[in-house]
Image (spheres, rainbow, N blue to C red):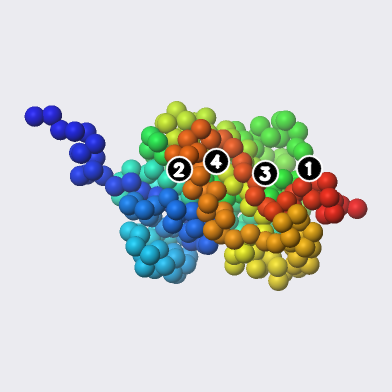
Amino acid sequence: MVLNPLAKREINMTDVTVVIGAGSIGQAIARRVSAGKRVLLADLRQENAAAAAKVLSDAGFDVTTATVDVSSRDSVHALVQTAAALGDVTGVIHAAGVSPSQASPATILAVDLYGTALVLEEFGEVIARGGAGVVIASMSGHRLPALTAAQDKALATTPVDDLLALPMLQPDQVKDPLNAYQISKRANSLRVMAEAVRWGKRGARINTISPGIIFTPLARDELTGPRGQGYRRMIDLCPARRGGTPDEVGAVGALLMGSDGAFITGSDFLMDGGVTAAYWYGELAPK
């Protein structure tokens, strides 16, 4: 008797979507791509993961929680093992990070730059054929002046555990939190481009989304922080004349992780209401 291999998989395995970062954007994407799948929701703080899990569970999703420190290889590796034990990892949504108003340059580089590279490497070892991932970067990466080709390649391909030792990332080069954030987000898109080659060998895809001002708790920290006036000016002078919503990012995430995006990998999607356009060619251009 020959069993249908698909039937065997249906009996024994579950597709798993891993969401790293329990914030509004990660949840918005997860809601669109996780029906009928198990969701593993991980955050640095268990209380954040539990609160987000309740919202998703109340909406009918099968949710498991975990804690993770993306700046720790042991912690990320443990999360990978937890995810793989639940079933086939077919989706990875990496939405964890800290903003310029929340942390020092060193912490931003450790979490947003190194942590993202670590997540890409570790989950690239287990992502299932046909799987897809999305990394949430930022429009800030698009406002950083052009780097040299050598710097781009270094950010994209340097072994993960050597990244923070790059000369361009030392304290005498990265002196303020905003600069650290811009470099980290530029590095995210470069790293995803390089990782798309490796993920592709497993039959999987990976892309970045670079949102602008999306109304989340993190954005509200910025709007009420020392750079708040600048953020409000960006909203007022961008072509869209407003900030965005997590659901709008969720729609793009669903495209990139679904069958309609099957030909898209190694790409970065800027969605900022035109802030970057206005920065380079409009009223937001530096004087």
Give the percent coordinates (x, y) of residue 269.
62, 44
Amino acid on which disc 1 is placed: Pro
Q: Distance between the Cα atoms at labels 2 and 3?
A: 25 Å
Q: Distance between the Cα atoms at labels 3 and 1?
A: 10 Å
Residue drawn at the location 49% of the way across and 58% of the way down: 28
N-terminal of the pair, mark 4 or mark 1, is: 1
Q: Which residue is mark 1?
A: 145
Amino acid on which disc 2 is placed: Gly
N-terminal of the pair, mark 3 or mark 1, is: 1
Q: Nearer the viewer, mark 2 or mark 1?
A: 2
* SS for dot 4: strand
Q: Nearer the viewer, mark 2 or mark 3?
A: 2
Vertical placement of 134 versus 247: above or below? above
Q: Which residue is mark 2?
A: 258
Q: Which mark is residue 207?
A: 4
N-terminal of the pair, mark 2 or mark 1, is: 1
Q: Decide: marks 2, 3 in contact (CB < 8 A)?
A: no
Classify 10 Å Cα crowding around label 2: few (below 14), some (14-19), many (20 and above). Answer: some
Residue drawn at the location 22% of the way across and 33% of the way down: 5
Give the percent coordinates (x, y) of residue 39.
37, 55
Amino acid on which disc 4 is placed: Asn
Amino acid on which disc 3 is placed: Arg
Q: Which residue is mark 3?
A: 186
Q: Nearer the viewer, residue 268 or 106?
A: 268
Give the percent coordinates (x, y) of residue 238.
76, 56
Report whether 59 appears left or right of 267: left
Report whether 63 appears left or right of 248: left
* SS for dot 2: loop
N-terminal of the pair, mark 4 or mark 2, is: 4
Q: Is residue 175 visible?
A: yes
